[in-house]
């Protein structure tokens, strides 16, 4: 099927009429997917929980929800569950259609042409997208060198150096995707205190539940300029439902609520998230499987003399040098999907999600086969 013939000049005009910052945007490239729904592959390209969601979360999806009614716009049940879990007042919370939605709300509320946002090179790719879509400027800081103990991770010193009078937001992914590196709380506290007070610090903790110990989401609530984002897409295994949340001072939350679409989080996502929060055992088990897979993959990386980045999340990013593209194809032919990182300016590196024990064995076997091929 094709679109009906249209006037070529009219088409050019309407496309060129989009805002210049939007015309310059390169759309987000998702990780590889199986080519058909039935294809059995190791999906290690998108940092999803290989064990899937909690059985308790799944059970809520089988209960009849009244889908002819709009969702609860305030997410009361989830608000209650998370305010207990994080020991914070309920109005410190906001929910998003994935935590990417919350990053977008931050950009919408705090950025515009003439303002800038600061983040590190090799930080999560959604930051440049939301910044540019808001018409603002991205100021990108130099990461730590690859030899650092947090290889290619965020360097608070260079982040600070990028801040100027136009800066309204600093994005810090902790742990960062795709470097798997972290900043410790004292480093983050020092960063917050060194920044001018009008700069909003977005602490993106999508992988917090893989850290040891799991940091408390409300630990920076004393700072009104900090917003912490978390997601149900990673350890909670609910990426397909799209739900995330943020914690901040209620007045900052109120600003974000002004630009939030009503009913941005669907009913099923809210129900499943409440159950997921209550299933600590699933989180504990997922952490254990991840830690075990991480140890094994790291050991293989050492044996095969592949340089690895940080280990604080549910993926390991490995240096294949000039062969990175060929390795993607080699693994693809063996039914393994991993993430190439050209958009992250890491063309020689591949990000491998830690899978189930079986998937880890498959990946390790394939990497050994590649090394001896
Ligand atoms: C996966 C990820 C997210 C979460 O995205 P959702 O929109 O919640 O699915 C946020 N930040 C980082 C750094 C991520 O890697």
Image (cartoon, helix red, strand yellow):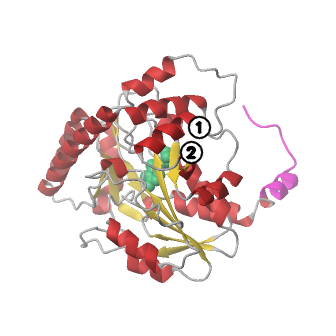
- Residue that numbered label 1 is attached to: 75
**Is 7 contained in the magenta span?**
yes
| Residue 26 showing in the rendered view | no
Counting from the top left corner in percent of width and height, residue 139 is at 54, 75
Q: How many marks?
A: 2
Q: Residue at x 75, y 62 (%)?
A: 19
Q: Residue at x 48, y 30 (%)?
A: 272
Establish whether ligand 1 lies closer than 8 Å to the Cβ of label 1: no
Q: Residue at x 47, y 33 (%)?
A: 274
Counting from the top left corner in percent of width and height, residue 276 is at 41, 33
| Residue 176 showing in the rendered view | yes
Can you tell which quarter of the image residue 173 is in? bottom left
- Residue that numbered label 2 is attached to: 95
Which one is nearer the viewer's eye here, 89 or 4? 89
Residue segment shown in magenta: 1-15
Which one is nearer the viewer's eye here, 269 or 293? 269
| Tag nearer the camera, 2 or 1 | 1
């Amino acid at each position: 099927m094709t679109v009906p013939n249209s006037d070529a000049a009219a088409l050019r005009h309407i496309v060129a009429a989009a805002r210049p910052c939007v015309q310059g945007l390169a759309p987000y490239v998702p990780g590889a997917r199986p080519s058909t729904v039935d294809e059995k592959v190791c999906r290690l390209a998108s940092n999803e929980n290989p064990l899937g969601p909690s059985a308790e979360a799944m059970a809520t999806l089988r209960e009849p929800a009244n889908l002819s009614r709009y969702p609860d716009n305030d997410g009361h049940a989830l608000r209650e569950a998370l305010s207990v879990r994080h020991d914070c007042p309920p109005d410190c919370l906001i929910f998003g259609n994935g935590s990417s939605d919350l990053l977008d709300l931050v950009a919408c509320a705090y950025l515009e042409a003439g303002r800038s946002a600061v983040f590190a090179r090799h930080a999560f790719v959604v930051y440049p997208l939301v910044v540019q879509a808001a018409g603002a400027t991205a100021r990108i800081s130099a990461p730590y060198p690859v030899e650092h103990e947090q290889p290619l991770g965020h360097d608070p010193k260079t982040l600070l150096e990028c801040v100027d009078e136009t800066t309204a937001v600093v994005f810090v992914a902790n742990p960062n995707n795709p470097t798997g590196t972290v900043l410790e709380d004292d480093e983050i506290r020092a960063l917050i205190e060194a920044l001018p007070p009008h700069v909003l610090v977005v602490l993106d903790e999508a992988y917090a539940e893989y850290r040891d110990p799991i940091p408390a989401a409300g630990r920076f609530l004393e700072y009104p300029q900090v917003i912490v984002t978390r997601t149900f897409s990673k350890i909670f295994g609910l990426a397909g439902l799209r739900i995330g949340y943020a914690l901040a001072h209620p007045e900052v939350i109120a600003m974000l609520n002004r630009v939030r679409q009503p009913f941005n989080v669907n009913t099923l996502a809210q129900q499943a998230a409440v159950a997921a929060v209550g299933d600590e055992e699933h989180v504990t088990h997922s952490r254990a499987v991840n830690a075990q897979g991480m140890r094994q993959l790291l050991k293989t990386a050492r044996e095969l003399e592949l340089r690895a980045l940080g280990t604080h999340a549910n993926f390991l990013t490995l240096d294949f040098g000039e062969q990175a593209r060929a390795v993607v194809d080699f693994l693809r032919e063996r039914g393994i999907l991993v993430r190439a990182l050209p958009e992250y300016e890491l063309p020689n590196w591949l990000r491998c999600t830690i899978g189930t024990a079986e998937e880890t064995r498959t990946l390790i076997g394939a990497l050994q086969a590649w090394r001896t091929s």
